[in-house]
Amino acid sequence: DAGVTQSPTHLIKTRGQQVTLRCSPKSGHDTVSWYQQALGQGPQFIFQYYEEEERQRGNFPDRFSGHQFPNYSSELNVNALLLGDSALYLCASSTRQAPPTDTQYFGPGTRLTVL
Amino acid sequence: GENVEQHPSTLSVQEGDSAVIKCTYSDSASNYFPWYKQELGKGPQLIIDIRSNVGEKKDQRIAVTLNKTAKHFSLHITETQPEDSAVYFCAASIARWRAGTALIFGKGTTLSVSS
């Protein structure tokens, strides 16, 4: 049973560019949440997708957007990159089909460096 | 806004000793409290969780206690081993009607177990 997978592992971009990160949830999971983890900090909630819609959003600007596909995989897009966007981006999957619906399992993350 | 405070930020113990990490949350509506272990270069791994209808939960050497009145919860690791060395994060749930569960994380505790 494959866990949560994310791609790419590492990414280097320059200020002003755009980036797309990808996530595939655990088998049987239908909900994907994205978190940003700055160095030395805890993860911060960006947003959550369920049934291909954004259901809940944290305190992040509109430069951060996402998408969920019919197979439950998800993308995180960040436009107009800033130096402060450098972080580990984590995807977490969960399910609403059966309890516990609040348990989230994390992927290995994508390390984004903005120069 | 919602907040989770975690203490201590660093903890050094000898192999075989016990380790305790404490967290305080602010949102009285929080009802789910997971603990994650994060090793260098990896995503957070769920190690134990507790819900608000339970005061204590144990899984082998790991236990978690919850005091909803005081909005405190703690992680207890007994008989520590060098492989327990990692960063530990506590989290509290934020649930919005029909929007699923998001997690608010503490800033983490770096646990070092020396042999």
Image: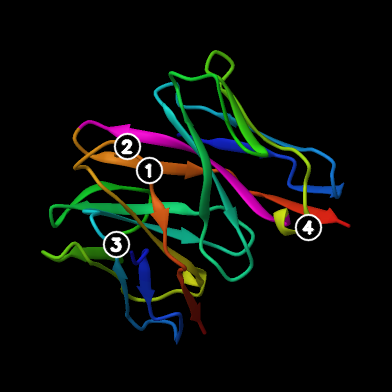
Question: As displayed, is residue A80 above or below residue B62?
Answer: below
Report crowding for label 2: few under 14, some 14 to 19, many 20 or more residues within 10 A (C-alpha): few
How far apart in space, not on screen, are marks 1 and 3 (Cα)? 13 Å
A78 displayed left or right of B28: left
Residue A6 percent across, percent down from the top left: 37, 72
Residue receiving disc 3: A25
- The amino acid type, in three-letter code, at marker 1 is Thr
> Considering only vertical position in the picture, is B12 above or below B28?
below
Q: Which residue is mark 4?
A: B82
User: Contact (CB < 8 A) between labels 2 and 3?
Assistant: no
For the residues beneath circles 4 and 1, the answer to whether they share a chain is no
Disc 2 from disc 3: Cα separation: 16 Å
Residue range highlighted in magenta: B85-97
Image location of residue A2, percent across then percent down: 34, 67
Determine the residue positioned at 23% across, 55% down.
A28
| Residue B26 part of the magenta-drawn span | no
Question: Main SS type for the magenta part?
Answer: strand
Q: What SS does tag 2 mark?
A: loop
* Residue A100 numbered tag: 2
Query: In the picture shown, does residue A34 fall above or below B58?
Result: below
Q: Position of residue A87 (x, y in %)?
A: 51, 69
Q: Nearer the viewer, residue B18 or B102?
A: B18
Three-letter code, disc 3: Pro
The tag on residue A103 is 1
**Label 3 environment density (alpha carbons within 10 Å; few <14, some 14–19, many ≥20):** many
Q: Quadrant of the N terminus of chain A?
A: bottom left
Which residue appears at 13% of the width and 52% of the height?
A: A51
Q: Chain of mark 1?
A: A
